[in-house]
Image (tube, grey):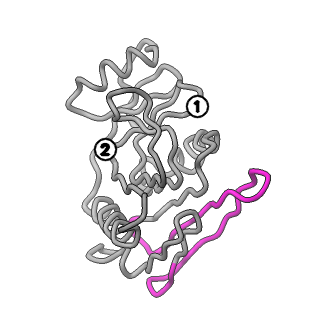
Amino acid sequence: MSTQLTATRLTPEEYLAAERESEFKSEYVEGVVYAMTGASVSHIQVVLNISSELKGQLRGRSCLVLPSEMKVKLPDSRKFFYPDIVVICGQPAFHDERRDIIENPLLLIEVLSESTEKFDRGAKFQAYQTLESLREYVLVAQDRPIVEQYVRGDGGTWIYSATIGIESTLRLMSIECVLRLADVYENVELG
């Protein structure tokens, strides 16, 4: 996870008031505010590639593809995150009249970096699972063609699969879209 910004714990209301006035993004977990660090060119390019592909495929449907500027609120109100990509289909549920915090994502995508990978796989995914609307969680490596996918099955269990290799294709079950990894990693220097 990123660097802790606050020495004292803040209430969700205090966090939101400060976050909405800040020039920099931060996430909130159980009273602690964490700074969001800058992203690499590869990270930004992968987010842009996926967002563009999904936007095109979802054209004409009542779905929104929102890159990393949209906060997601967890049901307990004690956690706010900025996923790399949020997809909502149907009417968005906003936290309040500011319309800058989503409560009903269908699909969340995180592009992994060295500083966030452990958190994105662990505590963040665990927190995301409390969102009733969430049907799919996707983790995308930024330096090699590997995409990991968790799809919520019957009874709330999560089914894992991995798509590996630049010639592979990923089917996003929750939104009935297909991503070719060659498109996901277009203009990205792979290791």
Residue 159 occupies quadrant: bottom right
The magenta region covers: 142-169
Q: In the rendered image, is residue 191 in sight?
A: no
Q: Please give the name of the residue rendered at 50% of the width and 47% of the height, measured from the top-left corner.
A: 105
Residue 143: give x, y in percent of width and height: 39, 68
Residue 84 is left or right of residue 135, and the answer is: left
**Residue 121 position (above or below residue 42):** above
Residue 116: give x, y in percent of width and height: 45, 47
Q: Please give the name of the residue rendered at 20% of the width and 31% of the height, measured from the top-left corner.
A: 23
Q: In the rendered image, is residue 113 in sight?
A: yes
**Residue 173 position (above or below residue 134):** below
Residue 5 is left or right of residue 10, and the answer is: left
Residue 49 is left or right of residue 178, and the answer is: left
The residue beneath circle 1 is 75
Q: Is residue 164 magenta?
A: yes
What is the C-alpha distance between the residues marked 2 and 1? 19 Å
Please tell me how crowded label 2 is: few (under 14), some (14-19), or many (20+) other residues with Cα within 10 Å.
some
Residue 12: give x, y in percent of width and height: 45, 19
92 or 128: nearer the eye? 92
Amino acid tagged 1: Pro
The residue beneath circle 2 is 69
Q: Earlier in the sequence, mark 2 or mark 1?
A: 2
**Residue 167 position (above or below residue 132):** below
Residue 95: give x, y in percent of width and height: 44, 30
Residue 54 is left or right of residue 175, and the answer is: left
